[in-house]
Image (cartoon, rainbow, N blue to C red):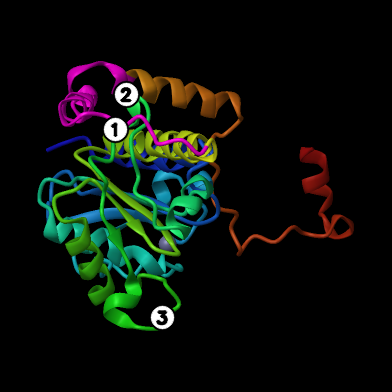
């Protein structure tokens, strides 16, 4: 058995970190396959990732049905996570995002190309997925199991899939690897788009460099070093996770406070 409480804290922190690094905003999410039950995964209730705490996490089966009715709003796009875990036993964490730096690539259907050594986190020209191809006119949200399964098929054996007119989904063998891939791929996309503005052909990697650079995550301490760095940046930004305000505890008007309550101040 793993330390589930610690795993839940790590997943909440991943949501906070990836948001603090500008990949997630009010939308998007990071999930984790359940460390003890591979047929389940953990994902926050519907909440901005920057605010997610371990208490917000809901346990789902791979059909994205909650094990217990949570009684709170849930992410409509959670099928992205469930269908990828179903299709890819080697994936233990998924991040779906709509990072602004990727939008120029998505809008022009331009291949994601590594432009610096650490930027090769998405593999060689990761695939595009267009919801329109299979489902016609939709609101572009991935909300049915069929949508999620189609996206998982497009991901195939890759670690990143670009979603036309929508965003990006990345996978990882661990929560930290997934967060690393999401953040570093965004840095690469930013550099790539800026480089393309210069109007010259990109200086692309050789197949051998692609292979070796893709292994950097596994061969170095960069993953843990980055996690610590991003954790400190989050702390410096004052990004301590905050509990959701309770709707059932409205503030009592000051005039009606009891004498006893006033004395406690
Ligand atoms: Zn989305």
Looking at the image, tell me whether mark 3 or mark 2 is earlier in sequence order: 2
Q: Which stretch appears magenta? A: 199-224
**Circles 2, 1 touching at the beta carbon (< 8 Å):** yes
Quadrant position of residue 106: bottom left
Q: Which residue is tagged 2? A: 117
| Label 2 Cα neighbours within 10 Å, binned few <14 / some 14-19 / many ≥20 | some
Q: Using the numbered discs, state the Cα–Cα distance from disc 3 to disc 2 in whole angstroms.
A: 37 Å
For mark 2, give the secondary structure: helix
Q: Which residue of the protein is positioned furthest toward the right in this rendering?
A: 255
Of 175 and 240, nearer the camera is: 175
Q: Position of residue 235 (x, y in %)?
A: 54, 26
- Left or right position of 12 against 61: right
Q: Using the numbered discs, state the Cα–Cα distance from disc 2 to disc 1 in whole angstroms.
A: 6 Å
Q: Which residue is tagged 3? A: 138
Q: Position of residue 124 (x, y in %)?
A: 23, 41
Task: In the rendered structure, find residue 27 and report the number of the disc placed on it.
Answer: none
From the viewer's perspective, is residue 245 above or below residue 182? below
């Amino acid at each position: 058995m793993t330390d589930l409480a610690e795993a839940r804290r790590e997943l909440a922190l991943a949501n906070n970190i990836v948001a603090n690094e500008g990949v997630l905003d009010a939308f998007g999410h990071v999930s984790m396959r359940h460390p003890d039950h591979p047929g389940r995964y953990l994902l926050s209730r519907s909440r901005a990732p920057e605010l997610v705490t371990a208490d917000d996490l809901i346990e789902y089966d791979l059909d994205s049905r909650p094990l217990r009715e949570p009684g709170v709003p849930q992410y409509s796009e959670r099928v992205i996570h469930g269908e990828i875990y179903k299709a890819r036993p080697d994936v233990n964490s998924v991040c779906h995002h709509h990072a602004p730096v990727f939008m120029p690539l998505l809008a022009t259907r331009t291949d994601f190309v590594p432009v610096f050594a650490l930027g090769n986190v998405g593999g060689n020209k990761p695939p595009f997925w267009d919801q329109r191809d299979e489902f016609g006119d939709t609101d572009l949200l991935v909300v049915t199991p069929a949508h999620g399964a189609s996206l998982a098929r497009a991901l195939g054996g890759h670690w990143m899939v670009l979603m036309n007119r929508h965003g990006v989904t990345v996978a990882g063998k661990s929560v930290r690897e997934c967060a690393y891939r999401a953040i570093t791929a965004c840095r690469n996309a930013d550099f790539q788009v800026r480089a393309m503005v210069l109007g010259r052909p990109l200086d692309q990697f050789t197949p051998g460099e692609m292979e070796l650079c893709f292994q950097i995550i596994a061969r170095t301490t960069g993953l843990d070093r980055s996690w610590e760095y991003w954790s400190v940046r989050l702390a410096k930004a004052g990004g301590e996770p905050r509990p959701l305000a309770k709707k059932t505890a409205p503030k009592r008007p000051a005039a009606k406070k009891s004498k006893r309550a006033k004395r406690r101040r």
